[in-house]
């Protein structure tokens, strides 16, 4: 009983941590670290542009809703 309660509490904390808002500085730092880890050149202008596109309310913070990936527009060649 105690083990299952502990597991549930840990899972709830994990879910809460994943749904955190991200500031512009945190976004840039995370993308820079990912680029360096992948061995790619980091372009801060492109990164800031991507942040601005995602930040729909222009408050400098990406909310949980803004972080969700947007559905891709269908092209003529896409298979149904």
Image: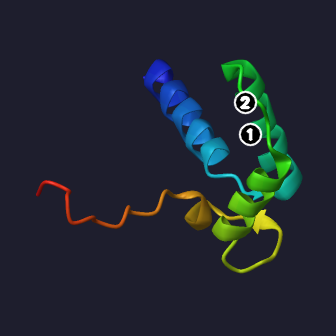
Q: Nearer the viewer, residue 39 or 27?
A: 39
Q: Nearer the viewer, residue 41 or 70?
A: 41
Colour setting: rainbow
Q: Is residue 6 above or below residue 52?
A: above
- The answer to whether marks 2 and 1 mark residues whose Cβ atoms lie closer than 8 Å is yes
To which residue does mark 2 refer?
35
Which SS class for mark 1?
A: helix
Tell me: 1 left or right of 63. left
Quadrant in the picture for residue 62? bottom right
> Badge 2: how crowded within 10 Å, few (<14), some, or many (20+)?
some
Q: Residue furthest left?
A: 80
Tell me: 69 left or right of 30. left
Quarter of the picture containing the C terminus is bottom left
Rendered location of residue 30, percent (x, y): 77, 38
Q: Residue furthest bottom?
A: 57
Q: Is residue 5 above or below residue 71?
A: above
Name which residue lies at 56% across and 43% down. Answer: 15
Q: Nearer the viewer, residue 27 or 6?
A: 27
Tell me: 69 left or right of 38. left
Rendered location of residue 34, percent (x, y): 71, 30
To which residue does mark 1 refer?
31
Which SS class for mark 2?
A: helix
Q: Nearer the viewer, residue 10 or 42?
A: 42
């Amino acid at each position: 009983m105690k083990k299952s309660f502990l597991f549930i509490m840990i899972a709830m904390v994990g879910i809460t941590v994943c749904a955190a808002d991200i500031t512009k500085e945190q976004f840039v730092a995370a993308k820079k670290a990912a680029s360096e880890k992948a061995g790619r050149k980091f372009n801060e202008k492109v990164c800031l542009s991507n942040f601005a596109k995602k930040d729909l309310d222009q408050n400098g913070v990406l909310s949980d809703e803004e972080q969700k990936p947007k559905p891709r527009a269908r092209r003529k060649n896409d298979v149904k």
